[in-house]
Amino acid sequence: MARVTDMDLDPATMRKQYRSEIVFEDSLDEDPMQQFALWFQQAADSHLFEPNAMVVSTATPEGRPSSRTVLLKQFDGRGFVFFTNYASRKGREIAANPQVALLFPWHPIARQVIVTGTASRIGRDETAAYFRSRPHGSQLGAWASEQSSVIASRGELDRRYAELAQRYPEGEQVPVPPEWGGIRVVPQEVEFWQGHENRLHDRLHYVLDGEKWRIERLCP
């Protein structure tokens, strides 16, 4: 067998006891978006690095999955919004199969939130409003990168960016790329996970039942 590493680390021996308060069903908000807002605020108050970082998982119509970390940029009663190049792998997969999963991995506070739902593009006005709120360099980056496509070198990417910076100097409005925009994930299920000692974790699972949410507890 080929040598993988010189480090003498065995992941099977890595263990941590989670010590936190039990989450009971009657302590939860009946609306998972309200409950998410509470936990999201608590994650931010705990000074986690980028608490809005989430793993977005998509799949082809044939069921071949892919995952990547993106940043949550908006959320409200309509769902969770992130922005991407629609021609990227995730953009293409969402267009072909709108079933999506989101995972917020708040490890330092032994929590995670898992969302499953359907994804669709937001309106161009909403996309333009957010795009214009981004730093100038990020606006240029959205044009420079044809996300998920093969590129010859890092130098080629830097060259594209430099040309754009010359065309649209600081202070000049950058147009919104036509293939760039927001994706909203409308939740159908939301799970709130709280780690506990002896792997007896809390898993509180919201399921949309008609127009109402049902809360059930899952075994860890």
Image (cartoon, rainbow, N blue to C red):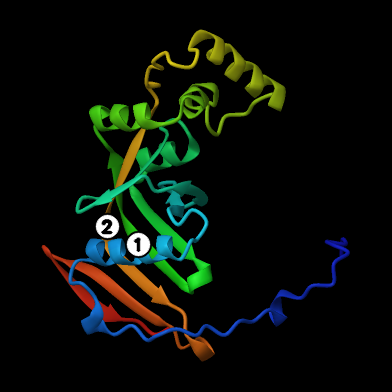
Q: Secondary structure at mark 2?
A: strand
In the image, 109 versus 177, the foreground residue is 109
Q: Name the residue rendered at 44%, 71% in the picture.
A: 111
Can the viewer see residue 153 in this picture? Answer: no
Can the viewer see residue 114 in this picture? Answer: yes
Seen from this angle, which residue lies furthest bottom? 198
Quadrant occupied by the N terminus: bottom right
Quadrant occupied by the C terminus: bottom left
Which tag, 1 or 2, sits closer to the chain's start?
A: 1
In the image, 176 versus 170, the foreground residue is 170
Residue 12, how many percent across, how many down? 70, 79
Relative horizontal placement of residue 211, taking residue 150 as reference (left or right)? left
Label 2: which residue?
Answer: 187
Residue 210, how many percent across, how many down? 12, 64
Label 1: which residue?
Answer: 41
Q: Residues within 10 Å of mark 2 (few under 14, many from 20)?
A: many
Q: Residues within 10 Å of mark 1 (few under 14, many from 20)?
A: few
Relative horizontal placement of residue 112, taking residue 182 as reference (left or right)? right
Relative horizontal placement of residue 106, taking residue 40 as reference (left or right)? right
> Which amino acid lies under the numbered mark 1 shown in the image of this protein?
Gln
Q: Secondary structure at mark 1?
A: helix
In the image, 40 versus 45, the foreground residue is 45
Residue 24, how many percent across, how many down? 29, 85
Asked if 7 appears above or below 131 in the picture, the reply is below
**Label 1 – label 2 distance at C-alpha:** 19 Å
In the image, 207 versus 73, the foreground residue is 73
Residue 43, how many percent across, how many down? 42, 64
Report the disc number at residue 160.
none
Q: Name the residue rendered at 47%, 47% in the picture.
A: 70
> Which amino acid lies under the numbered mark 2 shown in the image of this protein?
Pro
Query: Quarter of the image holding residue 192?
Result: bottom left
Circles 1 and 2, Cβ within 8 Å, touching? The answer is: no
